[in-house]
Amino acid sequence: MKNWILFSSLLFILSCHGEKSCTYFTQEKASQSFKNIEDICNRDNGNLWGENLFGPIMFVDRITRRIIANQPDNEGLLKGKDGVYTGLYPKELMVNHGSVTFGGSKYAMVPIPNEEDDYRITTRAIHSLFHSFQKSAGILSASYNTNNMDDKEARLWIKLEWKALRKSLNSEGEERRLAIRDALIFRGSNRELYTKYADNENKFENHEGLATFTYTLLSTNSPEEYKMRLFENLDQIYSMQSYSRSYGFIHGALYASLLFEQGFDFSTIKTNNFDLGNAVRELYNIELPVICRDVAGSLAVNYNIDAINKEEEKRLAEIKGRVHKQISTFTEKPVVFLELESPYFDFEPEDINSLDTLGTLYNSIRVSDNWGKLTVNKGGCLVSNNFKSLRITAKGFKKDKNHVEGEGWILILNNNWELVIVNHNYFISKLMP
């Protein structure tokens, strides 16, 4: 079994809930958006990353699968009118943020927000354009496992680090340097405890944190507006029940902000596991203790560690209540078990909750794997902590050839795969040739 997993999370600050078609996004609206996005990218014109990020964009409605693109595809699948190209995206394929190939052409795919908001539309597009750039530059890595960030001690350190990073961005001179030092000591303490996750954390912070930094910087018109949007993002993630699929979006952006203010050349980032924290340490000439945890405890008092402890105790109590309430959904027969081989996840990070040792509960999620595509709209999906399997309730189970559905979910099986019954539960199985 492959030991990697691909994530494509929506912009949680900008995400929209509900399953309805985005009727407001007309061809005229799309044309205006394309021009606005191009103007923003041209205004930067490669100053940030050494390359103008603008390119082929494909907006896609998740429900109708309607495509509105700014450039034609090589195979003529899209039909053009007034500089806008329309068509349908195949139902069996995932809709997510990132680079896709359609009709022999590469596009930055952008799920259309349900609610009309120019900032949401713009930032989603630049998010996907940046991932396209990362892919072409060889620094894209959607492969990482940061489940450690849902441990209580990891969350304590990460919250302390965020408080210190916020303080550093709101101060100057020696006060800023001291706040950066504190943040790096909290970061070091976390990594001393979870050493084996450091490379995965770097990848997450580069993959999504640099995306957050880029779209926020390019889409705002002043340092004040940039900081406001950045801290709005931080506040929302801070309050989330699970950090394992969300912390990197803001964490990398905070460190990138400090690098940017010192004139860092982002085009020098050539690997997908570049350590943004270490780059900040070098650029600001910060000296750290040999063992960060030796001094981190005393520094934590300055960042209201007692309040953070109370927040985390409340979270643990809520998790216990959630486990007690929902355990039967995923443990009592019949249940559908799907083994994960090379999965691709698409989800909203604010819809994730920990069920402790049982795994992670995704209230809604889209998963594709070798066996096909699963869409969960309600009722939840429980993914094991080691990402080797997932389970959904078998209530309302119905099967029609390769189309399977249950209460709140739909599964489309690829050819040569089937669901078999074992002890009243359903398991995925590949047909023998």
Image: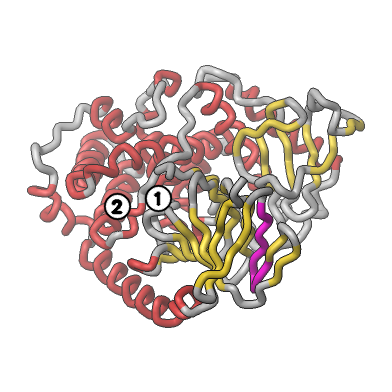
Determine whether label 1 and label 2 are within 8 Å by CB. yes
Residue that badge 2 annotates: 158
Residue at 23% in and 41% down: 184
Q: Which image quadrant is residue 126 in? A: top right
Q: Position of residue 200 (x, y in %)?
A: 35, 40
116 on left or right of 288: right
- Relative to residue 115, is residue 24 drawn left or right? right
Q: Main secondary structure of the magenta part?
A: strand
Q: Quadrant of residue 179?
A: top left
Q: Is residue 239 visible?
A: no
- Circle number at residue 81: none
- Whether residue 122 is visible, yes or no, is yes
Is the C terminus in the top left, top right, bottom left or bottom right quadrant?
Answer: top right
Residue at screen point 43% across, 42% down: 2
Task: Give the CA distance from mark 1 to mark 2.
Answer: 8 Å
Q: Residue 210 in the image: x percent, y percent?
A: 46, 35
The magenta segment: 405-413
Q: Which colour scheme appears in the figure?
A: secondary structure
Q: Circle 2 sits in a helix, a strand or a loop, which is it? A: helix
The amino acid beneath tag 1 is: Tyr
Out of 279 and 128, give the one closest to the viewer: 128
* Residue under the point 61% across and 77% down: 395
Residue 431 located left or right of residue 89: left
Q: Nearer the viewer, residue 288 or 351?
A: 351
Which mark is first along the chain, 2 or 1? Answer: 2
